[in-house]
Image: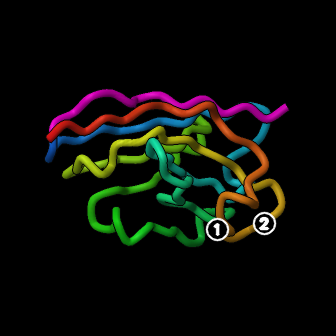
Amino acid sequence: EAHLVESGGGLVQTGGSLRLSCAASGFTFDDYAIGWFRQAPGKEREGVSCISRRGDSTYYADSVKGRFTISTDNAKNVMYLQMNNLKPEDTAVYSCAADAYGSSCRGGDAMDYWGKGTLVTVSS
């Protein structure tokens, strides 16, 4: 059974950095489209970044382009989200997810497996 566990969230000041990790078990990252999503209090879930199957392409939300970087360590079956120059509006619960059937980044509704999330709080 597929299982995802996020870590690395916390409290950081504006302009700071955090690196989130998503450890997977029960499947191989390289065989799935995988991504990061976030949900702030009172707001809808937002796709942050995604890597297509085999790592052929990546996607970033406009709000994080140039500040966030998604990567994977296939040997460890871990996905990362390096977040730099954090802003208060980045405050949210960040979750990783995997799409078992699509090869491209298709959005949150296509994701089959989800982690429970990790909270990122950026203070002003």
Q: Residues within 10 Å of mark 1 (few under 14, many from 20)?
A: many
Residue 33, quarter of picture = bottom right
Q: Is 51 on the left-hand or right-hand side of 60?
A: right
Relative height, residue 10 to residue 45 (above, below)? above
Tell me where residue 21 appears, x and y as whole percent: 47, 36
Tell me where residue 57 appears, x and y as whole percent: 55, 72
Tell me which amino acid carries mark 1.
Cys
Name the quarter where the C terminus is drawn. Answer: top left
From which residue to which does the magenta span run?
A: 1-13
Residue 105 disc label: 1
Tell me where residue 84 appears, x and y as whole percent: 24, 50
- Residue at screen point 66% across, 33% down: 4
Q: Is 115 on the left-hand or right-hand side of 121?
A: right
Relative height, residue 4 to residue 39 (above, below)? above
Tell me which amino acid carries mark 2.
Gly
- Residue at screen point 47% across, 38% down: 93
